[in-house]
Amino acid sequence: MNLGWEAVKFFTTLHVGIISFGVTILGLTETSLKWIVIPIFIIGMFLSNLGYNTRIRYRQYYLRSLYDKTLIEDQLKLREPLNGYPFENHILAISPTETIDYPEESLIDPNKWIDKYMKPKGTVTYNHLRIFRMLGFIYLIMIIGVAILYLFNYLFFK
């Protein structure tokens, strides 16, 4: 789980730096330097897509490892209720999280199960993915805005 969080921290820090650098350049009085932010924001847009894909890949690794764990537990009979205990959930299998209710569903069709839990709403993964998409949209708006302002300035004040 640490790999996904490290990637999110890395990309978040990178985006804060890119946006700060771009806004700083836009705040300069020298008009001729302002066009430089367009390639910077294009790079940021590509990096937000890379962050999105990295988070998706990590989620796939996590769900695949959870499937493997469930398969091993099933083969070792760790999912069967223990004798002598009244509650049916007294088992030796390890539950992953509350959002993944029945990991044993993965034994029926692993790919369908992974698709089901790939981007569930209300999870940390879902929120990370939304943040990366919003960053890409913010970069796009900034690119269009700078291009319009630069073009307007060039056409009417030159």
Image (cartoon, helix red, strand yellow):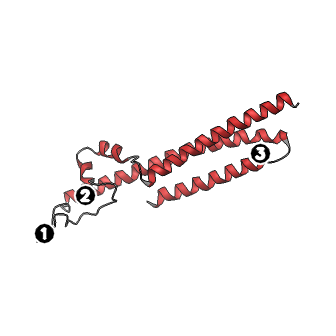
Labels 3, 2: front one: 3
Does label 3 or label 1 sit earlier along the sequence? 3
Q: Which secondary structure, mark 1?
A: loop
Under mark 1, the amino acid is: Pro
88 left or right, relative to 149: left
The residue tagged with tag 2: helix, strand or loop? helix
Tell me: 90 left or right of 61: left
Q: Is residue 17 above or below residue 84?
A: above
Q: CA distance from mark 2 to mark 1?
A: 25 Å
Q: Is 63 located above or below residue 35 in the figure? A: below
Disc on res. 72: 2
| Residue in front for this viewpoint, 16 or 59 | 16
- Considering every residue shown, the one lying at the far top of the view is 155
Q: Earlier in the sequence, mark 3 or mark 2?
A: 3
Q: Quadrant of residue 81?
A: bottom left
Query: What is the distance, in whole Å, between disc 3 and disc 2 at their CAs?
Result: 56 Å
Tell me the amino acid under the disc marked 3. Answer: Leu
Which quarter of the rendered picture does the C terminus lie within? Answer: top right
Instruction: Give how far apart the Cα atoms at labels 3 and 1 are.
Output: 68 Å
Q: Name the image quarter holding the N terminus.
A: bottom left
The disc placed on residue 86 is 1
**Which residue does the image show at 36% across and 51% down from the upper left?**
63
Q: Residue at x 83, y 27 (%)?
A: 155
Q: Amino acid at mark 2?
A: Ile
Residue to which mark 3 is pinned: 26
The percent position of residue 8, horizontal first and vertical second, equals: 53, 55
Residue at image location 24% in from the left, 63% down from the top = 93
- Counting other residues with Cα less than 10 Å from the Cα at mark 1, is it few (<14), some (14-19), or many (20 or more)? few
* Res 21 label: none
Task: Determine the secondary structure under disc 3.
Answer: helix
| Res 156 quadrant in image | top right
Q: Position of residue 86 (x, y in %)?
A: 13, 69
